[in-house]
């Protein structure tokens, strides 16, 4: 594959800011990496607590049970969400006009909500719902911070409309539809955090049904298919792979609607076979992404995200099969699966997205040592938890009663966590240099001229 220099007008054409990184985007990268480092540090603390439970005694009331909520929530609402705020800034043109000055305060409001949330979780407040753990004042403040973001996006869209920067009805309709959908998110977060509302469940495990797993996975696929339109352009319009992918997605949503939303066991063939329909995305996703133009600096993380996606889809389906799920449910095996999803797939996708948005400034994520430390760290973590989960499935005392095998696995997990933490500290440290001219960066950080992968 040959590479072509990326001229300034070309940056604008594929969705990047022609003037380099905006203050809002810089804030997004720094805040999201900050929360990644905080979340990972807490992860290392948790891994230590599971290895040496006596350390809990030194922590007063702030023991394992409170830190685990902070760990999961900060990584989901800080690290996994803020880069998407950067994506929305780019799509709605928040880096231009009067709106640009409000981007940083909005990012700060989001981070303050996470700070408030952390304080409330550490103080023992909880909605009791995993990943929808907003209660008390934080349950009001976080949706308000999201609403502030929504207002900023709406103002920026109206401005670019007036300035005739939005061309074509498709671009306008897409952004209006996006705003309508996004308007529902703050009230939904508020309502869904209520302890009184529950989705359908599998009576054999107490976990989600195959239909609800399929539904949430299809929302992820829809995001994957929509993402390139905000980041770049298609190599050739009307490529059949692109059209076919959208048709398959619609067909799968129809299948999901036909399955209904009742409580039902994973032993029903209709449940695990329909979830297996996700396997079609193994070949389709790479082919779909190959139909778009990408900045050359994204290649490493784009490949990583596609590999993690493949592993997630296959392992997620296998884990749901009768016999396998019965052994793995509520064991360390599912901790490993959560890490495949968030630390593997979502993290690689977010970094790939940020590199595309940052363009020339995406160099901060391309250091080899941090790349391998992160990806192999997560992979080793997942492998260790799968082994621990498989043993735990047959012997539930395995992860509780001290023993050589348990301590060895948990010690190795601690090492993988330190590797991941080290990688994230590197990225946060390098993010201080974001937007600086190449000459003023430390020599080891200077990369070659910006390049775009050329169409064959
Ligand atoms: C992007 C980075 C990370 C994400 C998104 C993440 C996410 C999660 C999630 C969702 C859980 C709950 C799993 C479940 O109960 O099913 C979890 C638990 C946990 N994580 Fe992380 N994590 C990350 C990084 C780390 C790191 C670096 C460590 C350090 C070793 C770590 C250690 C732990 C531990 C010890 C648990 C508790 C496991 C248990 O209760 O048995 N995590 N993490």
Image (cartoon, rainbow, N blue to C red):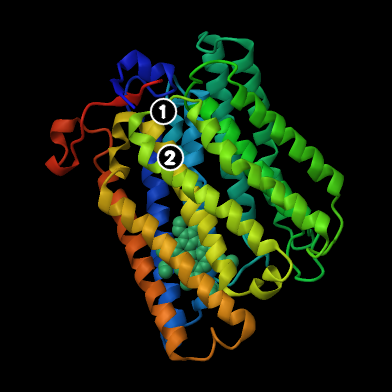
Q: Residue at x 27, y 33 (%)?
A: 435
User: Viewed as shown, does residue 84 lie left or right of 298?
Assistant: right
Q: Quadrant of the N terminus?
A: top left
Front residue of this view, candidates 137 and 385: 385
61 in relation to 153, above or below: below
Task: State whether residue 394 is above or below residue 364.
Answer: below
Mark 1, residues whose alpha carbon is within 10 Å: few (<14), some, or many (≥20)?
many
User: Is residue 244 something that shows in the picture?
Assistant: yes
Seen at 27% across and 26% down, the residue is: 450
Q: Give how far apart the Cα atoms at labels 1 and 2 are.
A: 9 Å
What residue is shown with label 2? 302
Q: Split into 4 quadrants, where in the image is the C terminus?
A: top left
Q: Secondary structure at mark 2?
A: helix
Whether disc 1's CB lies below 8 Å from ligand 1 is answered: no
Residue 185: image quadrant is top right
Give the mark nearer the N terminus: 1 vs 2. 1
Nearer the observer, 359 or 98? 359
Q: Residue at x 37, y 28 (%)?
A: 295
Q: Nearer the viewer, residue 263 or 156?
A: 263
The residue to which callout 1 is attached is 294
Residue 315: x %, y % from top left: 59, 58
Q: Is disc 1 in contact with disc 2, using a CB cutoff of under 8 Å?
A: yes
Residue 70 at least partly seen: no
């Amino acid at each position: 594959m040959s590479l072509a220099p990326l001229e300034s007008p070309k940056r604008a054409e594929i969705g990047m800011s022609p003037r380099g990184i905006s203050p809002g985007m810089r804030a997004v990268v720094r805040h999201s990496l900050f929360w990644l480092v905080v979340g990972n540090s807490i992860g290392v603390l948790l891994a230590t607590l599971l290895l040496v439970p006596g350390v809990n005694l030194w922590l007063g009331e702030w023991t394992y049970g409170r830190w685990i909520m902070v760990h999961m929530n900060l990584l989901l609402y800080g690290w996994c969400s803020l880069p998407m705020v950067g994506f929305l800034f780019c799509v709605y043109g928040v880096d231009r006009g009067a709106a640009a000055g409000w981007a940083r305060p909005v990012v700060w409001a989001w981070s303050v909500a996470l700070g408030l949330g952390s304080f409330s979780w550490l103080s023992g407040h909880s909605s009791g719902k995993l990943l929808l753990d907003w209660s008390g004042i934080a349950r009001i403040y976080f949706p308000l911070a999201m609403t502030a973001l929504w207002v900023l996006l709406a103002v920026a869209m109206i401005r670019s409309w007036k300035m005739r920067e939005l061309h074509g009805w498709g671009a306008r309709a897409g952004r209006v539809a996006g705003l309508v959908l996004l308007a529902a998110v703050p009230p939904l977060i508020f309502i869904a955090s209520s302890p009184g509302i529950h989705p359908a469940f599998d009576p054999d495990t107490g976990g989600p049904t195959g239909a609800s797993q399929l539904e949430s996975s299809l929302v992820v696929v829809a995001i994957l298919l929509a993402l390139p339109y905000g980041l770049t352009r298609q190599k050739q319009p009307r490529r059949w792979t692109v059209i076919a992918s959208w048709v398959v997605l619609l067909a799968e949503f129809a299948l999901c609607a036909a399955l209904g939303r009742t409580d039902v066991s994973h032993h029903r063939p209709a449940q695990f076979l329909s979830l297996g329909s996700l396997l079609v995305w193994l070949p389709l996703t790479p082919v779909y992404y190959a139909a778009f133009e990408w900045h050359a600096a994204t290649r490493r993380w784009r490949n990583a995200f596609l590999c993690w996606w493949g592993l997630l889809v296959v392992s997620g389906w296998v884990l749901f099969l009768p016999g396998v799920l019965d052994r793995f449910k509520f064991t360390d095996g599912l901790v490993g699966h959560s890490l495949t999803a968030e630390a593997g797939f979502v993290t690689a996708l977010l970094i790939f997205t940020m590199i595309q948005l940052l363009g020339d400034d995406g160099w901060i994520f391309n250091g080899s040592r941090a790349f391998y430390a992160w990806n192999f760290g997560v992979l080793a973590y997942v492998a260790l938890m799968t082994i621990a989960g498989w043993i735990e499935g047959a012997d539930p005392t395995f992860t509780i009663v001290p023993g050589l095998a348990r301590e060895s696995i948990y010690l190795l997990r601690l090492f993988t966590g330190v590797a991941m933490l080290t990688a994230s500290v590197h990225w946060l440290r390098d993010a201080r240099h974001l937007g600086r001219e190449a000459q003023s960066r430390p020599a080891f950080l200077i990369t070659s001229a910006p390049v775009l992968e050329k169409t064959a």
